[in-house]
Amino acid sequence: MNGQAETSDEVLLNYLRRHGAARISDLVAESGVTATAVRQRIQRLMGDGLIERHAEKIGRGRPNHRYALTEKGENQAGNNFS
C-alpha cells in the first residue's frame, strides 16, 4: 500500500487476484468484517461485473460457492501486487 488505507472492496479484489478464488470464510478472515458485510460487498461487485460465483458440488447437500474475478475484475485490479 502507499500509505492510504485500502477500501474494503480493494481488500476483496486484491485477495481474489492473489489467490484466484475464495470462499466467504476466506474473505471474512482477510477483511476482518462479518460474513454479512462480505456477502453484501460481493453482491455489489458481482452486480458491477467484477466477481463471479462458481458452485462446487461436494457430496450431498448444498453446493459450496467460490468467488473469483471476472476478466473485467482482473483488468480493473491491475497487476501490481505483492
Image (tube, rainbow, N blue to C red):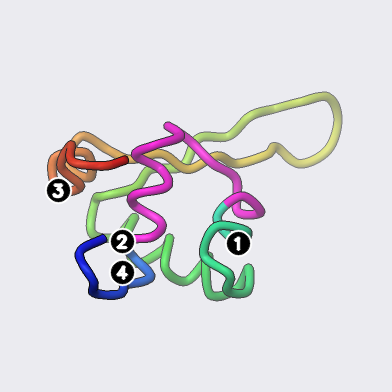
Disc 3 to disc 4, C-alpha distance: 15 Å
Query: Between tags 3 and 4, which lies in front?
Result: 4
Residue indicated by mark 1? 28
Q: Is 41 located above or below residue 46 in the figure?
A: below
Dot 2 falls on a residue whose secondary structure is: helix
Q: Residue at x 27, y 38 (%)?
A: 70
Q: Judge by depth and name the residue closer to the eye, 79 or 25.
A: 79
Q: Is 9 located above or below residue 55 in the figure?
A: below
Disc 3 to disc 2, C-alpha distance: 10 Å
Residue indicated by mark 3? 76
In the rendered image, the quadrant that contains the C terminus is: top left
Q: Which is more N-terminal, label 1 or label 2? A: 2
Residue indicated by mark 2? 10
Q: Residue at x 63, y 74 (%)?
A: 34
Q: Is 69 located above or below residue 37 in the figure?
A: above
Q: Residue 12 location in percent, x, y?
A: 41, 56
- Residue type highlighted by circle 1: Val
Q: Which is more N-terminal, label 4 or label 3? A: 4
Q: Residues within 10 Å of mark 4 (few under 14, many from 20)?
A: few
Dot 3 falls on a residue whose secondary structure is: helix
CB atoms at circles 4 and 2 under 8 Å apart?
yes
- Residue type highlighted by circle 2: Glu
Which residue sits furthest front? 3
Q: Judge by depth and name the residue closer to the eye, 27 or 61.
A: 27
Compared across the picture, whether 60 is left or right of 68 comes to: right
Question: In this picture, which residue range is highlighted in magenta?
Answer: 10-26
